[in-house]
Image (cartoon, helix red, strand yellow):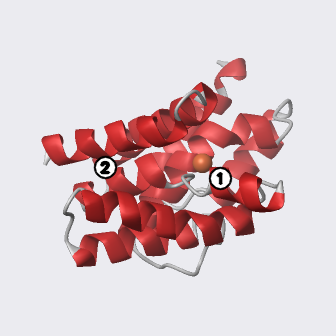
Amino acid sequence: MLERLSSVEAAMRDYFGADQRRIDHALGVTGFAEQILKHEKGDRLVVIAAALLHDIGIREAERKYGSSSGDLQEREGPPVAREILTGLAFDVAVIDEVCAIIASHHSPGEVDTDNFRVIWDADWLVNLGDEFDLKDDRKTFEMIRKIFQTTTGMSIAEQIYLQKDK
Ligand SMILES: [Fe+2]
């Protein structure tokens, strides 16, 4: 399985090419997904493939529409992910699930699975500081309670984003 996932990582690196920021983001989300999976339920092959490829639609969204908005990424990502995973001979069921997660990764509630929740939390662990002003620890704490969907994601978020008071 490790080998299959490193081939997905290599394909993602290839696809993003010189866009190191996107590669770093995908690897950051993958790292948090691994951490969350140590304590939460989830299928590692699906979760890690989805973490590596979750933003893969961004390049087509920018090329076609000049925008990287969430809904365009959700639309453009699955065909690219499907091509990559098909090329690596992944099972259709795994490909379908990864694509469903990518198609909804900015839309909570559409995919109600353990695998989705891990990706959702891992992406927010990377993005929270960029998306919100986190100066007020009480508000940050409330936001973490509202956004995160697994107890592990929540506690990692508290460790990262509430450390100012400690
Ligand atoms: Fe992301």
Q: Residue at x 19, y 62 (%)?
A: 89
Residue nearest the viewer, comparing 22 with 140:
22
Q: Is residue 124 left or right of residue 92?
A: right
Question: Which one is in front, 51 or 15?
Answer: 15
Q: Percent x, y for residue 11?
A: 36, 43
Q: Mark 1 = which residue?
A: 58
Kind of residue sitting beneath label 2 = Leu
Task: Give left or right: position of 80 versus 2.
Answer: right
Q: Look at the numbered disc 1 and say if its residue's Cβ is closer than 8 Å to ligand 1.
A: no
Crowd band around label 2 with a 10 angstrom C-alpha radius: few (<14), some (14–19), many (20+): many
Quarter containing the C terminus: top right
Numbered disc in front, either 1 or 2: 1
The answer to whether marks 1 and 2 mark residues whose Cβ atoms lie closer than 8 Å is: no
Q: Is residue 9 above or below residue 63?
A: above
Q: Is mark 2 within 8 Å of ligand 1?
A: no
Residue 48 lies, in percent from the top left, at 33, 50
Q: Position of residue 67 (x, y in %)?
A: 82, 55
| Residue lying at 38% horizontally and 64% vertically, measured from the top left | 83
Label 2 SS: helix
Disc assigned to residue 37: 2
Near mark 1 (Cα within 10 A), the count class, few <14, some 14-19 or many ≥20, is many
- Counting from the top left corner in percent of width and height, residue 164 is at 71, 19
Mark 1 to mark 2: distance in Å? 26 Å
Asked if residue 106 is positioned above or below residue 128 in the image, the reply reads: below
Q: Residue 70 falls in which quadrant of the image?
A: bottom right
Q: Residue at x 58, y 72 (%)?
A: 104
Q: Is residue 129 visible?
A: yes
Viewer-proximal residue among 86 and 47: 86
Helix, strand or loop for disc 1: helix
Q: Mark 1: which amino acid?
A: Ile
